[in-house]
Image: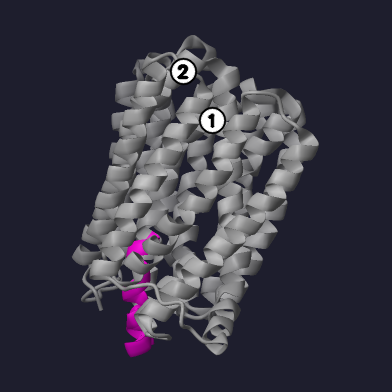
């Protein structure tokens, strides 16, 4: 089983790439928000949200299934790569054609029309990036994946800053985004062929059917999760227009950095846990429980600090027209602790071949957040969208824990043992932060963190140090 240090190292590669992508993009987005204004900036965010939704449909769950199949050697690697790329490109082209029909009927005004057309090109081209990312995950080429992502992002930023500096429109900014995807796709394909696998189209129909059948539960999860993540922007646009999407998008950009932390950790955990379950399920279960609780414990103090700093950060970095984004971000952040535990929980279900049950959970959660969005956004706008995200994430986390407790975790890893540490620590941290708030944000933050640390230490002592495993994946 892979050591905890290796998991953290692999996660570090991916998290560095995502952190770089977010932090390096932040000055660009601030500049773009000021240059374009809320309306045109909202168009950019609306289109990218739509592209992500369509990309999830073209993905059809190939990422997790493909990575697991690489680890298990279910098919010749070149055949698997060819099948995954063919499926993604074919579905992406089909969805683009359907979207073009919808655009022809809807006929959006300029420049939204041009941005949407470029978005469809980006969605289709991203098939190369997503396919290679799946192969890199299964082959544990995390450093290469991180490096190539950084290069693609730098290309986008270079052309994006150039477009804004020349006074060009939001169309040019979206074109820069497409150029970045083209460059990253080419680099990834070259690296994959040289270091991971080629892409053979000489696969059999039986192999194709094996992949399609295996992808189905993951496909349901992928589509439902994208609805969960991005339907809010579409509903906001429908009820309150592009400017409201721009305000929400600023908060969501900061929030999405935290969302990538559990996604990155999940990708790093998947190959090792998959192999571990094949060798020693009992030991793998202990490691699963360790990571499941640890990410919950670690996320709470990070979110407290981020909530306190959200106001100063946004007010100092963004134009005054985005002041409403502060409260939206502060609410959104509190969906992260249940989300990070749910993400690790889904990896555990995947390696234990319970992905069908996991798919049903995300379908239920997607329905919950859509219903909450339709209920809250018309009346409360962006604040309602943030509240809906938190509520739906709590529903998701409760369902995930129920499945883990029923099918995976041993009785000794029950409800109290799993949640006593983060819940009691969170209560103490929140109480201390509120009591010290009149003294200023810095004493409030320090006092909350200190109270959390004391409670975590005390709970750990009552457990006798908790379960000991030699390694965890």
Where residue 463 appears, as percent x and y from the top left, is: 32, 66
Where residue 374 appears, as percent x and y from the top left, is: 76, 39
Label 1: few (<14), some or many (≥20) within 10 Å?
many
Assign the C terminus to one quadrant of the image: bottom left
Q: Which residues are magenta?
A: 266-284
Q: To which quarter of the image does residue 448 belong?
A: top left
Is residue 3 covered in magenta? Answer: no
Q: Is residue 311 above or below residue 159?
A: above
Q: Farthest top residue?
A: 320
Q: Is residue 312 above or below residue 179?
A: above
Where residue 8 appears, as percent x and y from the top left, is: 24, 59
Left or right placement of residue 207 versus residue 283 in this view: right
Q: Which residue is mark 1?
A: 249
Q: Farthest front residue?
A: 202
Residue located at (71% from left, 24% from top): 240
Q: For the residue labelled by badge 1, is the local secondary structure a helix, a strand or a loop?
A: helix
Left or right placement of residue 328 versus residue 265 in this view: right
Q: For the residue labelled by badge 2, is the local secondary structure a helix, a strand or a loop?
A: loop
Q: Quick check: marks 1 and 2 in contact, CB under 8 Å?
A: no
Q: To which quarter of the image does residue 389 belong?
A: top right
Residue located at (65% from left, 23% from top): 110
Is residue 267 covered in magenta? Answer: yes
| Residue in the foreground of this view, choosing between 159 and 299 | 159
| Residues at marks 1 and 2, CA–CA distance in whole angstroms | 21 Å
Where residue 123 appears, as percent x and y from the top left, is: 53, 49
Residue located at (58% from left, 77% from top): 212
Q: Which residue is mark 2?
A: 168
On residue 371, which mark appears?
A: none
């Amino acid at each position: 089983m892979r050591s905890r240090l290796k998991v953290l190292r692999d996660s570090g590669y991916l998290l560095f790439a995502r952190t770089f992508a977010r932090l390096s993009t932040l000055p660009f987005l601030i500049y773009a928000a000021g240059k374009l204004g809320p309306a045109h900036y909202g168009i950019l965010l609306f289109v990218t949200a739509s592209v992500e939704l369509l990309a999830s449909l073209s993905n059809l769950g190939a990422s997790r299934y493909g990575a697991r199949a690489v680890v298990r050697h279910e098919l010749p690697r070149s055949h698997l790569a060819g099948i995954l790329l063919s499926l993604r490109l074919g579905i992406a082209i089909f969805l683009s054609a359907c979207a073009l029909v919808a655009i022809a009927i809807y006929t959006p005004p300029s420049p939204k029309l041009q941005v949407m057309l470029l978005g469809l090109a980006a969605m289709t081209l991203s098939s190369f990036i997503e396919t290679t990312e799946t192969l890199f995950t299964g082959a544990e080429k995390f450093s290469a994946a991180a490096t190539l992502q950084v290069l693609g992002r730098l290309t986008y930023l270079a052309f994006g800053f150039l477009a804004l500096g020349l006074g060009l429109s939001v169309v040019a900014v979206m074109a820069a985004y497409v150029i970045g995807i083209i460059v990253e796709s080419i680099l990834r394909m070259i690296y994959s062929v040289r270091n991971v696998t080629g892409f053979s189209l000489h696969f059999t129909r039986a192999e194709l059917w094996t992949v399609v059948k295996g992808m189905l539960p993951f496909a349901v999860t992928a589509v439902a999760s994208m609805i969960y993540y991005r339907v809010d922007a579409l509903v906001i646009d429908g009820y309150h227009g592009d400017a409201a999407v721009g305000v929400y998008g600023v908060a969501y950009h900061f929030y999405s950095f935290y969302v990538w932390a559990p996604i990155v950790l999940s990708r790093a955990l998947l190959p090792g846990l998959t192999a571990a379950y094949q060798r020693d399920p009992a030991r793998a279960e202990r490691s699963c429980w360790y990571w499941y609780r640890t990410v919950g414990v670690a996320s709470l103090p990070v979110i407290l600090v981020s909530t306190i700093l959200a106001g100063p950060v946004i007010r100092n970095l963004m134009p005054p027209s985005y002041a409403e984004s502060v409260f939206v971000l502060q609410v959104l952040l509190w969906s992260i602790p249940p989300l990070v535990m749910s993400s690790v929980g889904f990896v555990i279900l995947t390696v234990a071949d319970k992905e069908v049950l996991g798919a049903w959970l995300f379908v239920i959660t997607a329905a919950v957040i859509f219903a909450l969005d339709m209920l809250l956004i018309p009346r409360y706008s962006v604040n309602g969208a943030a509240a809906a995200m938190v509520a739906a994430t709590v529903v998701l986390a409760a369902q995930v824990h129920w499945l883990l407790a029923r099918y995976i975790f041993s009785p000794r890893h029950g409800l109290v043992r799993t949640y006593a540490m983060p819940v009691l620590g969170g209560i103490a941290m929140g109480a201390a932060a509120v009591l010290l708030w009149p003294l200023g944000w810095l004493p409030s933050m320090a006092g909350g963190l200190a109270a959390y640390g004391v409670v975590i230490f005390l709970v750990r002592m009552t457990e006798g140090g908790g379960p000991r495993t030699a390694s965890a994946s």
